Image (cartoon, rainbow, N blue to C red):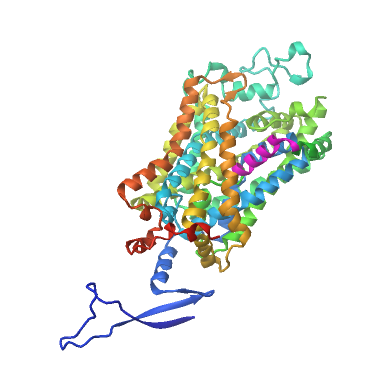
Amino acid sequence: MEQPVLKARSPTANGSEPVDPNGRVVCQVELILVKEHNGVQFTASTLANQAGREERETWGKKIDFLLSVIGFAVDLANVWRFPYLCYKNGGGAFLVPYMFFMVIAGMPLFYMELALGQYNREGAAGVWKICPIFKGVGFTVILISLYVGFYYNVIIAWALFYLFSSFTGDLPWVHCNNTWNSPNCSDLWAFNTSLNDSHKSTPAAEYFERGVLHLQDSEGIADLGLPRWQLTSCLGVVIVVLYFSLWKGVKTSGKVVWITATMPYLVLTVLLLRGVTLPGAIDGIKAYLSVDFLRLCEAQVWIEAATQICFSLGVGFGVLIAFSSYNKFSNNCYRDAIITSSINSLTSFFSGFVIFSFLGYMSQKHNVPLDKVATDGPGLVFIIYPEAIATLPGSSVWAVIFFIMLLTLGIDSAMGGMESVITGLIDEFKFLHKHRELFTLFIVVSTFLISLFCVTNGGIYVFTLLDHFAAGTSILFGVLIEAIGIAWFYGVDRFSDDIEEMIGQRPGLYWRLCWKFVSPCFLLFMVVVSFATFNPPNYATYTFPMWANVIGWCLAISSMSMVPLYAIYKMCTLPGKLAYAITPEHEHHLVDNGEVRRFTLQHWLVI
């Protein structure tokens, strides 16, 4: 409904009424168009602002956005991390703390980032026009995404190397008669030999460490050597795929995810149907689901559940903000948050059946306890699982299927991280909009060059160091500052008004309480726990030297330092104007008039 409104204009700048040449007071009026939508009135200026928002590129279809978010959040950790945590921490009982933290922190933070990006239609840095002093956290998450790209793409390169190696009748990780094998290699299962042979290694383990990584040619992180041309070539292919998936923005990436986000579900289903037919599979699944509620009395179980929630949903990388910024303004981001976060958790749970059906098979085949074969991390998908596949009829076909799944799991998550960096920076530095293709090329090539350190003989040590420091404590810190900036400084009531303006429905009291109190307290607890439980990185029996740990901490601090550094910069450029730094940019005219909402008690108490 639209209606014209007559409004008297304000007096002139000197406070006097306007007069005509005869000295008579002139009454001036202006016609303002007011449009009412869902009970909210918008003036012409507001409508003009929203019209400007709509000029931004949007997803071709709604499903493109959903698949992109699901593809990013559902990554390799859903396969190699969650099932092992569930098995190690009381089986089905682990779902209690996992779901608890999912409801009080995971979903609210996921919803918060989607709404923040969609309303402000900017990347991770640009959205902080709502509270300029906090813009540093935007650069924090952009840096974290960039750092993660340095080593995450290497995992995809490993998977591609394994995929190429699978196109053979005799898989190379089956026997010990290869050039890379050591005298310690044994075709017998290492854990099923006598104590005197406990140092023996399996063909699959030696293929990964000696045939792929060439770890035997390095004595540590100080002895990296040159990049291996095979892995460098695979990494180059990954970078080329990423570039052509991202160079045109969401119009191209939104189509790529139709394959990369759906393929893992097809492959997981096929692998599950095959896995449950194997001897010992049911025992593996029973071990995965066995319920031990006594484990819930252990603090470590709750800490690991909270940690898994923090990292599995992908909050804090700026990706959700970047993706949702390309949504239509009226998109129902609340429904999207519930759907995508639920699918992510269900995928983690579902993948556990696939993993443990094969682990149960391996346990029975080699007559060893399940805990001897159950592991997490790269060792699961590049050693244990390939070894299990190698024992099946038609093993090469199953290996190809499995590594295609790993590729698709990794590619769309890598695309999300890259898009966070690209969108965040081109929205902050507007001149880059006209050169997106070149800037995208610059980002992916830079990432490739840094990643070369991870494909050297000692590259696994660089990989481990980056994995340990790039996105650990720093990302928890970033999300904590983000939650405080939105819920307390911008105001949870204002944020709720923004959501109501978009979807016509105000978030309920539960969401507002989580944003203002529960989630920040949860994140503060996680930051403290992260520091308190910190352990230096190690790879197998290798311990990193002190200088390597110092470099790792410098990497972590470099991203976290963006928050105080930008705040100091903002205060220096606005001397004596704290009010401007904590007030949304579009309300700075109110500060000029002495109206500083953040200086009132009501702002801090309202929910």
In the current view of this chain or complex, which residue is farthest to the top?
Answer: 196
Does 458 sit above or below residue 554? above
Magenta stretch encompasses residue 102: no
The picture places residue 367, in percent across and down from the top left corner, at: 83, 24
Residue 106 in percent (x, y) is at 62, 49
Residue 330, given in percent of the width and then of the height, sits at: 52, 66
Vertically, is 285 above or below 516?
Answer: above
Whether residue 309 appears in magenta in the rendering, the answer is: yes
Tell me which secondary structure the magenta stretch mostly adopts: helix
For image coordinates 43% across by 67% down, the residue present is: 50
Residue at the limit of the structure toward the left, as seen here: 21
Residue 264 image-quadrant placement? top right
Which is nearer the eye, 473 or 441? 473
Q: Nearer the viewer, residue 83 or 65?
A: 83
Left/right placement of residue 115 relative to residue 401 reads left
Q: Residue 502's spot in the image, x, y percent?
A: 52, 65
Quadrant of the drawing holding the C terminus: bottom right
- Please tell me which residue is depicted at 53% across the width and 51% down the height of the picture: 320
Is residue 408 visible in the rendered structure shown here?
Answer: no
Does residue 276 appear anywhere in the picture?
Answer: yes
> Residue 68, relative to residue 34: is it above or below?
above
Chain part drawn in magenta: 297-311
